[in-house]
């Protein structure tokens, strides 16, 4: 591991939750005071799955990733064709959904999602990530997340609709917007999902995101998680890759070294408008990933309670 400040051992030698440990009952109760109107906003992209239509391609995603697939195992057409009802006239529709969440929909990364060397976060052996799932640091360790969310609406601060693809958000710019408290979820708006509506080619030309210094600044402030509306928290180049060295890779800084879970591909447009109109940046952030044992991540529907 790169020799720099980290959270390995901070929460005990067996820890698999990282800075989510900061969300004590007292911190959660304090976070609930951030809600003032009771309005609830979804921060998730829709999951549009199909096998014979372009529906999935109408939602922002990274190229080359398997898109969601939505199948009906039984539907109205089956009964029209003569399928026997269940019981006396009872009919049911049933479906199956396949989602490869990384890069295709709103999701949370588990601490086993990315590492360098032979160890996951906190020194857990990387060999424990098997073909059937990770036996250390899987997404099932997260549980429910209720925290104070702090929106860093960067393009609004700069007077832009969205950041340019090559923009890397500095620590100083984050500090000009807000200062997170320990246990907060830092929510970063770049405005990049808006680009998809105008041009897929532009969306795939790269993505704005946090700089390495900004990631270290958030880690130093003990945030419980970092969420963003881009696909990788940090920026991406035209090949869909992060250009930083291993020392400055945002996933390694946050997930691997500090045990800070990442939440990617959020929809933050309405949240930004509502908070800007109210003249504030804080809200109650609520999320609960699917309890996928050994999962490297999970689809997610984060909620903002204003």
Image (cartoon, rainbow, N blue to C red):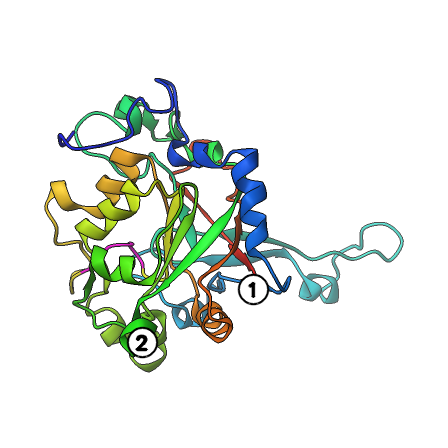
Picture residue at 39% right of the left edge, 69% below the top? 57
Depicted 222 relative to depicted 208: above or below: above
Looking at marks 1 and 2 on the same chain, the residue that comes earlier in the sequence is marked by 1
Secondary structure, magenta segment, majority class: loop
In the rendered image, residue 273, in percent from the top left (x then y), is placed at 46, 74
Identify the residue at image location x=42%, y=49%. 185
Q: Please give the range of residues in magenta.
A: 231-236
| Residue 64 shows up from this direction | no
What quarter of the picture does the N terminus occupy? top left
Q: Residue at x 74, y 56 (%)?
A: 92
Quadrant for residue 124, please give it: top left
Query: Alpha carbon of mark 1 to alpha carbon of mark 2: how far?
Result: 21 Å
At x 12%, y 54%, the residue is 243
Q: Secondary structure at mark 2?
A: helix
Is 123 situated above or below 28? above
244 sits to left or right of 71: left
* Classed neighbour count for the residue bearing mark 2: other residues with Cα under 10 Å, few (<14), some (14–19), many (≥20): some
Q: Is residue 14 left or right of residue 70?
A: left
Mark 1, Cα crowd under 10 Å, few <14 / some 14-19 / many 20+, is: some
């Amino acid at each position: 591991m790169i020799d720099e400040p980290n959270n390995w051992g901070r929460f005990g030698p067996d820890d698999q939750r990282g800075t989510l440990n900061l969300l004590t009952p007292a911190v959660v109760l304090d976070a609930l005071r951030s809600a003032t109107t009771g309005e609830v906003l979804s921060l998730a992209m829709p999951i549009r799955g199909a096998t014979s239509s372009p529906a999935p391609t109408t939602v922002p995603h990274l190229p080359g990733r398997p898109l969601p697939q939505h199948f009906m195992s039984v539907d109205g057409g089956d009964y029209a064709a003569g399928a026997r009802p269940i019981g006396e006239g009872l009919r049911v529709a049933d479906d199956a959904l396949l989602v490869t969440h990384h890069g295709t929909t709103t999701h949370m990364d588990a601490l086993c999602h990315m590492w360098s060397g032979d160890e996951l976060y906190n020194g857990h052996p990387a060999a424990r990530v098997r073909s059937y799932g990770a036996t250390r640091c899987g997404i099932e360790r997260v549980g429910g997340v209720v925290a104070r969310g702090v929106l860093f609406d960067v393009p609004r601060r700069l007077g832009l609709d969205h950041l340019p693809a090559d923009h890397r958000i500095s620590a100083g710019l984050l500090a000009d917007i807000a200062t997170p408290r320990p246990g907060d979820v830092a929510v970063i708006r770049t405005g990049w999902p808006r680009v998809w509506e105008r041009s897929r080619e532009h969306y795939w030309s790269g993505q704005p995101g946090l700089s390495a210094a900004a990631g270290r600044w958030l880690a130093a402030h003990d945030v419980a998680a970092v969420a963003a509306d881009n696909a990788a928290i940090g920026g991406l180049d035209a090949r869909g890759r992060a250009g930083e060295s291993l020392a400055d890779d945002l996933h390694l800084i946050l997930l691997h070294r500090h045990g800070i879970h990442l939440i990617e591909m959020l929809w933050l447009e309405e949240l930004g408008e509502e908070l800007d109109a109210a003249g504030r940046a804080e809200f109650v952030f609520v999320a609960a990933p699917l309890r996928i044992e050994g999962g490297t991540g999970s689809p997610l529907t984060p909620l903002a309670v204003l």
